[in-house]
Each structure stands twice: as structure tokens, then as C-alpha cells.
Image (cartoon, rainbow, N blue to C red):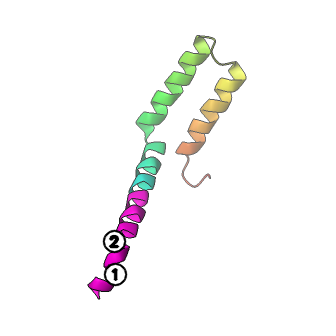
Amino acid sequence: MGLFTWPLAPVRGVIRLGELLRDEAERKMSDPTVARRELEEIEAAQAAGELTEEEASEAMTEVLQRMMPGEE
């Protein structure tokens, strides 16, 4: 049976790689350290005049919504 499934091995490898990349992206999206760094960058950009108050508020809301479980 293994001989017949052997030609599909590269496809399975690509699928597994995609799953690993997805899992890593999800982990980073919900990591509090990453969120804190992003919020600090938004605040710094606003203080430097690179973002308006409205743009900064929208960006902060996006970061905080990402952190809320089940809020998609």
C-alpha cells in the first residue's frame, strides 16, 4: 500500500508545511508580547505625527480585537 501512496508524498509535505505556517501565524497573532510591541509602535508613530489620532485608534482596535478569543 505504501508504494501506491508514495507519489503523493510531495503533496502531503506541502500541505503539512502550510499547516505549520498557519499555526505559527496564529500563534504570533495571539501572542501578548507581539501585541504590546505593535501597540507601542502605534503610539510612537502617533507621537511622531506619522498617524492621526483616528488612524492610531483604528490600528489599536485591530490589535486588541485580534487578542480577543472567539471574536472573529
| Residue 5 numbered tag | 1
| Residue 9 numbered tag | 2
The amino acid on which the numbered mark 2 sits, given as a three-letter code, is Ala
Q: Secondary structure at mark 1?
A: helix
Q: Residue at x 59, y 12 (%)?
A: 47
The reply to whether discs 1 and 2 touch (Cβ–Cβ < 8 Å) is yes
The vertical placement of 53 against 2, above or below, is above
Q: Secondary structure at mark 2?
A: helix
Q: Classify residue 62 as left or right of residue 38.
A: right
Q: Classify residue 51 as left or right of residue 34.
A: right
Q: Classify residue 51 as left or right of residue 23.
A: right
Q: Residue at x 62, y 15 (%)?
A: 50
* Magenta highlight: main SS: helix
Q: Nearer the viewer, residue 26 or 31?
A: 26
Please report the bounds of the magenta region as a residue range: 1-19
The amino acid on which the numbered mark 1 sits, given as a three-letter code, is Thr
Q: CA distance from mark 1 to mark 2?
A: 7 Å
Which residue is farthest right? 54
